[in-house]
Image (cartoon, rainbow, N blue to C red):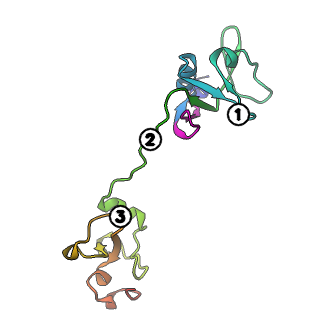
Amino acid sequence: MTKVLERPTLVLNRNWQPVNVASVARALVLVWNDSAKVVDPDDYRLYTWADWSGLAPRAGDLFIQAVRQRLRVPEVIALAAYDRLPSAAVSFSRRNVFKRDHYTCQYCGAQPGSEELSIDHVVPRSRGGQSSWENCVLSCIACNSGRPTGCRGRRA
């Protein structure tokens, strides 16, 4: 039963947008406290704790065996009062630029290794270019210095 209580349950905000994944145990606590309702994935019907606990598990459904009844395992719950979305902003950093560009020079396509790559400002900082997602790309040292002779391609 412990493994069933640790299974993931999708958590939706009240606008039905995904905001989190919680364990079955946490999801049932939220439903018990009237902070959420269970969403039946078959017909999208919402169930309160009283309604959900009264449903018998269908053939093949996961369930939790309580003392007097079997309780269906919720796959999706919808929160009653939460309508915000979690912040999805990824911070701008050297490591994240390398991940975004897949350790590949954006000018010649070479993958020489992280020690041979640098971050290039498309609009140079001396001309007002900012360090931002839109203005920075990964470049091999040869392309970044304007000498494409040491790389596999030419700078565009």
Instruction: Residue 79: give x, y in percent of width and height.
Output: 54, 29
Circles 1 and 2 in contact, beta carbons < 8 Å: no
Instruction: Residue 52: give x, y in percent of width and height.
Output: 68, 19
Instruction: Residue 148: give x, y in percent of width and height.
Output: 33, 89
Instruction: Report the residue marked by disc 1.
Output: 44
Q: What residue type is disc 2 on?
A: Pro
Give the mark nearest the N terminus, 1 or 2: 1
Name the side, left or right, on which 105 lies relative to 46.
left
Give the mark nearest the N terminus, 3 or 2: 2
Instruction: Report the residue marked by disc 3.
Output: 133
Q: Quadrant of residue 61?
A: top right
Q: Quadrant of the N terminus?
A: top right
Residue, x 19% and y 75% (percent of image)? 126
User: Residue 86 has which mark?
Assistant: 2
Q: CA distance from mark 1 to mark 2?
A: 23 Å
Residue, x 32% and y 58% (percent of image)? 92
Q: Quadrant of residue 149?
A: bottom left
Give the mark nearest the N terminus, 1 or 3: 1
Name the side, left or right, on which 104 lies relative to 37.
left
Residue, x 35% and y 64% (percent of image)? 133
Task: Identify the secondary structure beneath mark 1.
Answer: loop
> Which portion, as a residue range, is magenta?
6-20
Task: Identify the secondary structure beneath mark 2.
Answer: loop
Circles 3 and 2 in contact, beta carbons < 8 Å: no
In this picture, is 71 found above or below 20?
above
Q: What residue type is disc 3 on?
A: Trp
Instruction: Residue 22: give x, y in percent of width and height.
Output: 52, 32
